[in-house]
Amino acid sequence: DPGPDNYCYVKKVKEDGPLAARGRVVAGDFLVHVDGHHCRGLTRDKVKDWVVGEPGSQVELEFMDDRGRRYSVFVRRAAEVPDTSQAGAHAGREQGAEAERERG
């Protein structure tokens, strides 16, 4: 469920996951948007519904770091849903980070 400031946040980045491979997302970052959907005040389950989608499709995850800087990470959804108990609301069905861009 929502953490500080009513955003879902990254509890832990799986060491072998796509977000860790990008090296940008760290524990404590907030998930702000999923494919343009604003996440503030929503439950983890609602946010996960947006993250989980058509296998092989791409999803844009926009995060905010502890300095208020926003950045996006694009990941391709996997065919199977992994256990998300060790990561934040955005961990489901991510297979590979494809691109990242800074937002000013």
Image (cartoon, rainbow, N blue to C red):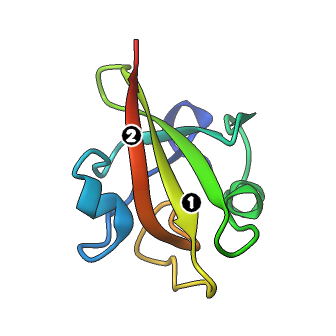
Does the CB distance between marks 2 and 1 fall below 8 Å?
no
Q: Can residue 61 be seen in this view?
A: yes
- The circle on residue 89 is 1
Q: Is residue 1 visible?
A: no
Structural crowding at the residue carrying mark 2, measured as other residues with C-alpha within 10 Å and reported as few (<14), some (14–19) or many (≥20): some
Q: Where is residue 92 in the image (x, y as percent from the top left)?
A: 57, 71
State which quarter of the image contains the N terminus.
Answer: bottom right
Q: Where is residue 102 in the image (x, y as percent from the top left)?
A: 37, 25
| SS at badge 2 | strand
Residue occupying the point 27% across, 62% down: 20
State which quarter of the image contains the C terminus.
Answer: top left
Q: Where is residue 21 in the image (x, y as percent from the top left)?
A: 25, 62
Residue occupying the point 52% across, 85% down: 83
Instruction: Please say if 104 is above or below 29.
Output: above
| SS at badge 1 | loop
How far apart are labels 2 and 1 at the CA level?
19 Å
| Mark earlier in primary sequence (2, 1) | 1
Instruction: Please say if 97 is above or below 77.
Output: above
- Residue that badge 2 annotates: 100
Residue occupying the point 27% across, 77% down: 16
Instruction: Please say if 18 is above or below 74.
Output: below
Amino acid residing under circle 1: Ala
Q: Which of 35 and 8 is in front in this view?
A: 35
Q: Which of 100 and 12 is in front in this view?
A: 100
Structural crowding at the residue carrying mark 1, measured as other residues with C-alpha within 10 Å and reported as few (<14), some (14–19) or many (≥20): many
Count of numbered tags: 2
Say which quarter of the image contains residue 61. Answer: top right
